[in-house]
Amino acid sequence: MKNTTLSLQEKKQKNEKITMLTAYDYSTAKLMDSCGIDVLLVGDSLGMVMLGHDTTLPVTMDDMIHHAKAVARACETAMVVADMPFMSYQVSVPEAVANAGRLIKECGVAAVKLEGGADVCPQIEAIAKASIPVMAHLGLTPQSINALGGFKVQGKDRAQARRLIEDARAVERAGAFAVVLECVPAGLAALITELLRIPTVGIGAGKGCDGQVLVYQDMLSLYPGNSPKFVKRYADVGSVMRSAFQAYIEETRSGAFPGEEHGFKIDDGILRELRQGCGAESL
């Protein structure tokens, strides 16, 4: 059966961990879905890992729709959530509802995710009232990277911690069905998880959350550069791919590839007739 907001809520009640990964294309999403992942997030992180930007800020609605369509087509059991990109919901409540509706209607995803706490509760409430499930996102919110002054852990001092708790309660009251906690101290994330009725999904927020999410390029060593502290490298797929690419280049240049076993045959008699008809016999 397809995972839904209700099945995620049941997992929290039963103390069963929620599994979530990012996905941006059909083939990768198909593999993840076949493994039994609970949720696939079409994150605006695609701006960095797929499109080569330095931040998520340049990502557009068209970018999100293009990738979300592909992921949604791949999934039989995973719940697909699509990020609302920067400035697709901040301008006004009606625009937020319209853009959330586009992601649901045009892509076939089951829910949308947006960043922010009490300041975006009017948007969350309006989108939820339009029968569109909303996942909130607190802590390190990449779309606010300029305001936050960089990629920094959030909630370490008393004032920030209290604000995060207040924001978490606010998004729950506004109608969010779950909340991502990013780069939040583990103890604080565990407290928020205890206080909320809705599930929490952590990324760099410790094991006390109801679930975990990672960017799949990070956990497979596909993204260049240093990975964040909270990432566990489950496989060095990047090295395997590089070796395969290098082997292909070398074999193509040397003539080792393609071999006879990789080609298709034509009857020798037909080939002789063709050569004669083309005058190739005299060459």
Image (cartoon, grey):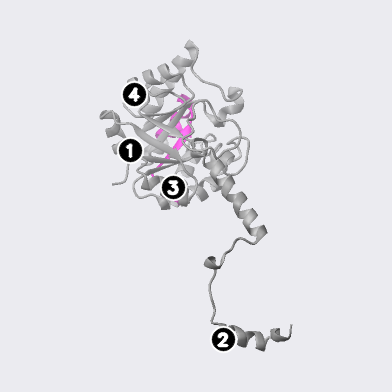
Q: Earlier in the sequence, mark 1 or mark 3?
A: 1
Neighbor class of circle 4 (other Cα within 10 Å; few <14, some 14-19, many 20+) is some
Amino acid on which disc 4 is placed: Leu
1 and 3 marks in contact (CB < 8 Å): no
**Residue 3, horizontal then vertical, whole percent:** 32, 42
Q: CA distance from mark 2 to mark 4?
A: 77 Å
Amino acid on which disc 2 is placed: Gly
Q: Secondary structure at mark 3?
A: helix
In the image, residue 24 above or below residue 16: below
Residue 113 belongs to magenta span: yes
Amino acid on which disc 3 is placed: Ala
The residue indicated by pointer 3 is: 29
* Span highlighted in magenta in the image: 107-125
Of marks 1 and 3, the one in the foreground: 3
Of marks 2 and 1, the one in the foreground: 2
The residue indicated by pointer 4 is: 196
Q: Earlier in the sequence, mark 2 or mark 4?
A: 4
Residue 103 belongs to magenta span: no
